[in-house]
Amino acid sequence: MKSIGEVAARFGLPAHVLRYWEAEGLLTPARAGSRRRYTDADLRRVAAILVAKEAGFELADIRSMLTDRSAAGRAAMAARQRERLRTRIARAQAALELIEGDCRHEDLMSCPHFQTLIDRQLDRS
């Protein structure tokens, strides 16, 4: 069993994050008096939370994913997250395209590359 400090250090997290996750129902470490004690299963759960966070899931979705026994429910959450990620990726690609345009015009509004991006935005709006 590990202390909150040991778990926090292992995952590079502040201890208050682990306490918050506990308050949100994501973790339920054992107690030895007033001290939290984390088992190997708890460590795996912390790792699972971090994996889901890296995929962009919000804590409420992560809690549902970890407690929902329905594969269909998890699949629906994954589908929603997939769409959110696709939207974020498209925005990031548009930003990258703007940056890579490396406009050298004195007036940004006269830059042909920037004009193309503006036209695309107008077409989408």
Image (cartoon, rainbow, N blue to C red):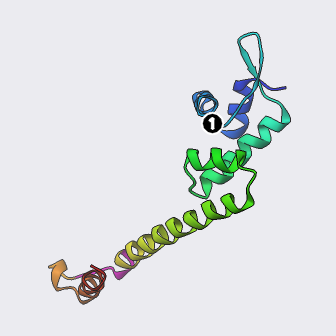
Q: Which of the 4 image quarters holds residue 5?
A: top right
**Which residue is pictured at 64% across the width and 47% down the height?**
64
Residue 104 horizontal/vertical position (percent): 25, 81
* Side of 91 where 16 appears, left or right: right
Q: From the image, which quarter does the N terminus lie in?
A: top right
Q: Nearer the viewer, residue 59 or 112?
A: 59
**Which residue is pictured at 33% across the width and 79% down the height?**
102
Q: Nearer the viewer, residue 64 or 37?
A: 64
Q: Which of the 4 image quarters holds residue 120?
A: bottom left
Q: Which residue is mark 1?
A: 13
Residue 10 horizontal/vertical position (percent): 73, 36
Q: Indicate whether 120 appears above or below 28.
A: below
**Which residue is pictured at 75% across the width and 42% down the height?**
45
Residue 67 horizontal/vertical position (percent): 71, 45
View extreme (top): residue: 33
Q: Nearer the viewer, residue 100 or 22?
A: 22
Q: Which of the 4 image quarters holds residue 7?
A: top right
Q: From the image, which quarter does the C terminus lie in?
A: bottom left
Whether residue 93 is in magenta: the answer is no
Q: Give the residues in magenta.
A: 99-104
Q: Amino acid at mark 1?
A: Leu
Q: Indicate whether 102 appears above or below 30.
A: below
Whether residue 100 is in magenta: the answer is yes
Q: Indicate whether 7 appears above or below 98.
A: above
Mark 1 burial class by Cα count in 10 Å: few <14, some 14-19, many 20+: few
* Side of 70 where 20 appears, left or right: left
**Which residue is pictured at 85% across the width and 36% down the height?**
40
SS at mark 1 in the image: loop
